[in-house]
Image: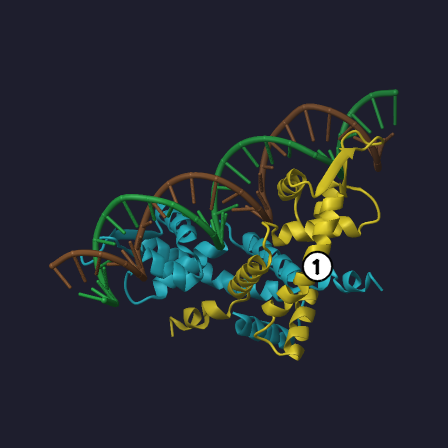
Chain colours: A cyan, B yellow, C green, D brown
Amino acid sequence: MTESQEQHYVLEEQVGYLLRLANQRHLSIFAEHIVDGLTSVQFSTLFRLRNEAGPMSQNALGRLVGMDAATTKGVVSRLISRGLIQMEKDPTDKRRYMLSTTQKGRALIEDTLPRMQQISEDTLAPLTPHEAKQFVDLLKKLT
Amino acid sequence: MTESQEQHYVLEEQVGYLLRLANQRHLSIFAEHIVDGLTSVQFSTLFRLRNEAGPMSQNALGRLVGMDAATTKGVVSRLISRGLIQMEKDPTDKRRYMLSTTQKGRALIEDTLPRMQQISEDTLAPLTPHEAKQFVDLLKKLT
DNA sequence: AGATATTCGTATGCATGCAAACGTTAATTG
DNA sequence: CAATTAACGTTTGCATGCATACGAATATCT
């Protein structure tokens, strides 16, 4: 009886534990499909910036992708050093840099997009189509 | 028509993107509930080691928690430096160290376990009980 | 037995991810 | 308008997480 509580806690059934493993698995699948060193987060960031109407600040972009300022700094720096995005001073706000995609960055998005669909499919492969839709919907509700 | 493919790719509906955000959210909830610096991975590792019958090697423990050897090394080192687990040489295998929990480690598990249930509940709070069960089941299928 | 594979732990480098602190600049508030 | 607050970008420190490489020891195979 004293051990009843612990008996109930099964690691393999906890959301946190499972979320971590599911995320790991997805990142592994992502790495298999992407030949150049582009990471999942880098793609998300680049894609978001391209889909925005105009240039935007670093912090604002980070927020749109779910990253804090410190993380954003690193991701953006790597995208800049690879020549995928560019930054220029904001004339109206001396604190800010305005970010935009380069031609090379937009071309990379075009090349990568077809593979992204496959990555999502592979990640959801253990589920039936109906379950996959359910899962994504529940994930959306959770965010 | 040329843009039909890109139009279909909506970042907020991709499993990978959503998994990343869901995981972030859970880690944030975890940090709120745990006062000492224990992390989610550290708890999982400590818990797994405690629930094993006897001492076990570092790499074997890491595998049980879903970590590679390099990651395991860091996690175990931190648990040792906090006095939560201990290691001693394996007499039969000169490469190996056998790990086991300390009294302090087991006590910490006891203290933490009641909060883990709440953390899982909070993580799943946006879902109905039925949806939560569905979600966890789908996550299990995915792993 | 001897050669080969594998496994052990370790180390380095790189990429997220967060907390905390910092100086600069803009916005808000009194 | 002056003082406070907030936002901008940056840096540091720490914790996962993976790839890769390494020497040492064990297992396996021929």
Mark 1 Cα-neighbour bin, 10 Å: few <14, some 14–19, many ≥20 = some
Q: Report if residue A125 is visible in the image.
A: no
Q: Position of residue A126 (x, y in %)?
A: 67, 66
Left or right for B28, reference A85: right
* Residue B123 or residue A130, whichever sits in front: B123
Q: Quadrant of residue A20?
A: bottom right
Dot 1 amino acid type: Leu
- In this rendering, the count of numbered labels is 1
* Residue A86 or residue B129, whichever sits in front: B129
Chain label for disc 1: B
Residue B141's place in the image compared with D30, above or below, is: below
Q: Report if residue A18 is visible in the image.
A: yes
Instruction: Tell me the residue at 39%/58% (across/down).
Output: A62
Q: Position of residue A112 (x, y in %)?
A: 46, 58
- Under circle 1, the secondary element is helix
Q: Quadrant of residue B2?
A: bottom left
Q: Position of residue A127 (x, y in %)?
A: 66, 70
Q: Position of residue A120 (x, y in %)?
A: 56, 65
Left or right for A99, reference B118: left
Q: Quadrant of the N terminus of chain A?
A: bottom right
Q: Which residue is mark 1?
A: B113
Left or right for B57, reference A129: right
